[in-house]
Amino acid sequence: MLTYPGRVAADPSLDYQDLLARLADVVYAVDTDGRFTYINPAGERIFGWAVTDLIGQHFAKVIAPDARAETAEHFRLGLASADPGRFFETRIVQPDGQVRDLEVHAGNIYRDGQLVGRQGVGRDMTELRRLQENLATKTRRLELLEEQQRAALEVYRRLNLMVGRAGGDPDRTEQALEAVERSLQLETARAMGLHDDLEIIALIADGYSNQEISDRVHLSVHTVKDRVSRIITKLGARSRAGVATRAAETGVLRTTR
């Protein structure tokens, strides 16, 4: 007889097989060696494998390679724990290579008081994670826009002040505009965390190699490589070739008027 510590007796009036078949979450059971002994129909959709291809196979078959060690450790700790249930997150990989996020609530299974395996419920969190990431990205963009707006207001204030002082002198007006543009560039770069990288950005835009940039800014090639990678990421460029375009669009690279 299978028992689950801390739970009431099963209700014989319920059709558990039908109930399990209707669930959108994967329900699974494994033996103490980690081999699947049961997977409900939702498991085929979530894991991407036919149930018959997984029964008797170790759970590592469906776990993404970079998540196997952590998942195996959760399994080991679960078997050794008196805790009736443990939550953890892992990543599964489907046969076509698609990786999905899975939130698992698992517990031990006992037969006549003897530990015989573990069972769990896995919820596909992939879409929710994507929505959370998209929200975080949009939030960061809004924060950047707000910072840029504040910078622009300060620049306009300085522009009015400096142009007023320049009077009708074209040279002084040009100097004032130059100072304002430089100020806006610095404020924007500071908001993006790139205020220390403006010289490197300009050199990348001019086509200089990492070695050439290293020689000009007196940093090691390794440090320059790391800085270039960070610049590409912060600008949202796909490669160093796109740095000039993205930098000009965001205002951290000044273009010739």
Image (cartoon, helix red, strand yellow):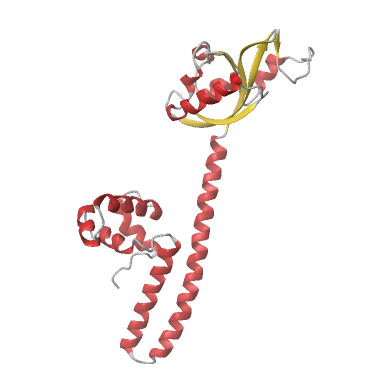
Q: Is residue 204 left or right of residue 132?
A: left
Place of residue 64 in the rendered image (x, y in percent of width and height, measured from the top left): 45, 27
Residue 208 sits in quarter: bottom left
Location of the C terminus by quadrant is bottom left
Residue at x-position 52% and y-position 41%: 130
Residue at x-position 36% and y-position 73%: 182
In this rendering, the answer to whether 195 lies above or below 122 is below
Q: Is residue 78 left or right of residue 98?
A: right
Residue at x-position 35% and y-position 63%: 248
Q: Is residue 157 left or right of residue 213?
A: right
Place of residue 192 in the rendered image (x, y in percent of width and height, measured from the top left): 43, 60
Please state which of residues 176 and 249 is positioned toward the viewer in this rendering.
176
In this rendering, the answer to whether 111 lies above or below 204 is above
Residue at x-position 65% and y-position 15%: 109
User: Can the viewer see residue 92 in this picture?
Assistant: no
User: Can the viewer see residue 193 in this picture?
Assistant: yes
